[in-house]
Structures are given as C-alpha cells and as structure tokens.
Image (cartoon, grey):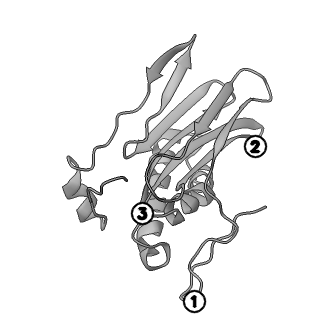
Amino acid sequence: MERLCCFNSTYSKFVGVRASYGSGKGRSNHGSVKYGFNLVKGKANHPMEDFHVAKFIETKGHEIGLFAIYDGHLGDSVPAYLQKHLFSNILKEEEFWTDPHRSISKAYESTDEAILSHTPDLGRGGSTAVTAVIINGRKLWIANVGDSRGVLSKRGQAIQMTVDHEPNTERGSIENRGGFVSNMPDH
C-alpha cells in the first residue's frame, strides 16, 4: 500500500502509515550485497515511532540499494515523512550520478527545510536518521543526523561508519535552525 501524506489544516496525519517492527534480510539482485535489519520497540511507554527502508531498485541502468533507519522522537509523523521523501529527494538531485556526496547532503538539507516548513502539520516531534546508498554493489555512501549510527560488517567485523551527533553539544545549531533539544525521561 502506498503511504500517503496530507498537509492541510483539517487532516494533518499520515494515512495508512505504521511504524516498522520486526526484522528482515535480503540481497541485491546481483547477489554481491547482503543486508539485514532488526527493529525492536524500546522500554518507553509510548508507541513505536521508528521507520525503515531496505530495498534495491533499478534505475537508469544501475542497481541502487537504499537503506535507512528513521528514529522518531515525540511522534511518528517526521520519520514517516522521511521514509516517504528522503530517498526520492536524493535520487532526483541533478548531480546524483556525478557527485552523490553533494546530492545526499543537499537532499538532507532540502528535506529538513520541508519538514520545518510543515511543523504545524507534522507536530513538534522529530527524527534521527541514518541512510546508506549503494550503487551497483560497488560504491557506498552513508549519512546520518542525530545519534542513528551506520555500521558495516566486513568478514564478521563491525566497522562504525558514522559519527553520532549529540544534541547537547549541537544545541545552538539545532535551535538556530528552528529545532529544539529536550531531555525527556523514558524517551
């Protein structure tokens, strides 16, 4: 079922969207890349707010692996929005095939701006994110925002691929962009 999003004053919730649960695994069509994921609801006394993407697509003669975890905070509207829009924003960047690093960075920025401009519809919640894009099983780009971490397994060894962004050390930057930092128990 396609996940739908409506931004208007009378209906501001995502329709047909459910947080991700469970685990899964798969491999690229060419068999050179294997993946797995596991999402577990934490102990906090609120519903699951996390979403994921784990799939391979064919586009312009290339096989693209798209992987993400969106860790929702104070609701599931923002991670649901990310699940629906972030990768499409990355892939539609004009420079994607010549400069994926720049395209991913620009898409993160434009998606963040869209979220901030829809704050009344999406609510006060937010999300961390970690994304991985694999092109033809040969080139890998990983990006993250917040404390979502990318880890690569190479011959059974875990390799940390990202650096966590800690909200308390980046409070000024977060607040200057329209966000906020709160320390909430059990969240």
Badge 1: how crowded within 10 Å, few (<14), some, or many (20+)? few
Is 78 rendered above or below residue 145? below
> SS class of the residue under badge 1?
loop
Is 47 rendered above or below residue 100? below
Badge 3: how crowded within 10 Å, few (<14), some, or many (20+)? some
Q: Quadrant of the N terminus?
A: bottom right
Q: Are marks 2 and 3 in contact (CB under 8 Å)?
A: no
What residue does disc 3 label? 74
Residue 73 lies in quadrant:
bottom left
| Amino acid identity at mark 1 | Thr
Whether residue 92 sits left or right of residue 45 in the image: it is right
> Horizontal and vertical percent for residue 158?
48, 18
> Horizontal and vertical percent for residue 62?
74, 36
> SS class of the residue under badge 2?
loop
Q: Residue at x 24, y 63 (%)?
A: 175
Q: CA distance from mark 1 to mark 2?
A: 39 Å
What residue does disc 2 label? 60
| Amino acid identity at mark 3 | Leu
Which mark's residue is nearer the viewer, 1 or 3? Answer: 3
What residue does disc 1 label? 10
Earlier in the chain: of badge 2 and badge 3, it is 2
Earlier in the chain: of badge 1 and badge 2, it is 1
Is residue 132 visible in this depiction of the protein? Answer: yes
Which mark's residue is nearer the viewer, 2 or 3? Answer: 3
